[in-house]
Image (cartoon, rainbow, N blue to C red):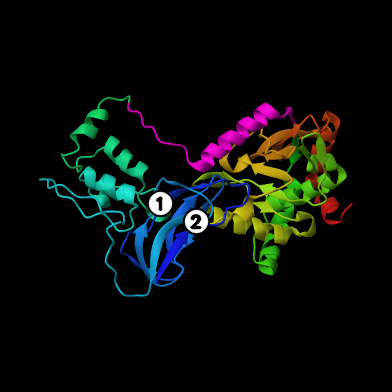
Amino acid sequence: MAIEIKAPQFPESVADGTVAAWHKKVGDKVTRDEVLADIETDKVVLEVVAPADGVLSQIIKVEGDTVLSLEVLAIFETGTASLAVPASATPEPTVLASAAPVVAASPDLAPSVRKAVAEHQLDASQIAGTGRGGRITKEDVNAHLAAPTASTPAVVEAPLSLAVGERVEKRVPMTRLRAKVAERLLQASQNTAMLTTFNEVNMKPIMEMRKAYGERFEKRHGVRLGFMSFFVKAAVEALKRFPAVNASIDGNDIVYHGYHDVGVAVSSDRGLVVPIVRDAERMNLAEIEKNILDYGKKAKEGKLGLEDITGGTFTISNGGVFGSLMSTPLLNPPQTAILGMHKIQERPMAVNGQVVILPMMYLALSYDHRLIDGKEAVSFLVTIKDLIEDPALLLLDL
């Protein structure tokens, strides 16, 4: 029986998507829930899976095509019997005879990649794949052509001529995620009155607490005690004291949120994503750590869902994991503030008239001055500093 394979149901905030890759070609037998294709939106990559055991009989939307919510992508025949590929299906590229040896393209290749490999008489096994699961993308093929090695077939003389000298250029389209990030960053810089205030925090008390109780904490809760959970808890407490920092601007209205959904920026292969720790005010340190760990794994595997990254009332970004000593984080509209954490570095500090070496971290709070006054922003950041430097205040709710 023929079944239409459709794009996922996109939320209202996502207008359309792009077919990023087909993992199966026409005529392939697949099993239920096996991934057929990836649909890239401006937020996440969504997987389209087989509804049952059967055969992919026709591909309607090829790689690179724009698709709308629930638009038909392909035709699928249920059952395990082998089917002939219909004439209307996407044809396999014809490989021209050549003196150069060509290794058959892997069935895991997307149609456009398979075509490029055949046209240039390439050995797919010699191309380094940077896609998910090591799959070869069209950009990988272009990079292989632009930087040939001694083992590259002689038939690619045209691409070779482009790579002569040291002024090679490569033009590739932005991914939808990168384009959306660029759009939102430009929006933040043009449509907000953004200012940044800085402070520094002594990390020694938190580090000593982790050293004293970290092992017992991990045995009890099954997750390591990190720094981020302390900052999330401190941020929530500060947001309770300064509600405007947890608010957003909607036209001429101020929307005060009675909950604290804290976005934690994490890096992925596709770029920066911000999964949301929802109702963080109801969580203890262990629950926050488990949420962050789970989101980190999902980000690395490309399995974050739209519900994981939609919303948020406040954001925390940790550039310190990459070695950043100080930076100015940009707002994540419509939020009105973002906290930037940085690298922990030992510095000489004056304590009670004595010079002491302490592990210090610079903190940065960027805020929308249209809603948040400077005094309020500084007080908010000082509150976080005080809670981190004396974690007993945080844990005892003082």
Tell me which residue sits at (19%, 40%) in the image.
Answer: 150
Question: Which disc is residue 53 wearing?
Answer: none
Quarter occupied by residue 32 = bottom left
**Residue bearing mark 1:** 61
Q: Residue furthest bottom?
A: 80
Residue 122 is inside the magenta segment: no
* Crowd rating for badge 2 (residues with CA inside 10 Å; few <14, some 14–19, many 20+): many
Quarter occupied by residue 314 = top right
* Crowd rating for badge 1 (residues with CA inside 10 Å; few <14, some 14–19, many 20+): some
Asked whether the beta carbons under mark 2 and mark 1 sit within 8 Å of each other, the answer is: yes
Residue 169 is inside the magenta segment: yes
**Residue bearing mark 2:** 7
Badge 2 marks a residue whose secondary structure is: loop
Task: Please give the count of numbered marks on the rendered protein.
Answer: 2
- Above or below, 9 relative to 162: below
Mark found first going from the N terminus, 2 or 1:
2
- The foreground one among 167 and 113 is 113
Region in magenta: 168-197
Tell me which residue sits at (56%, 56%) in the image.
Answer: 9
- Amino acid on which disc 2 is placed: Ala
Work out whether residue 128 can be spotted: no
Q: In this view, does 90 lie to the left or right of 61?
A: left
Tell me which residue sits at (69%, 54%) in the image.
Answer: 277
Q: Position of residue 290 (x, y in %)?
A: 66, 60
Q: Where is residue 257 in the image (x, y as percent from the top left)?
A: 81, 47
Q: Where is residue 30 in the image (x, y as percent from the top left)?
A: 37, 68
- The foreground one among 77 and 250 is 77
Work out whether residue 308 can be spotted: yes
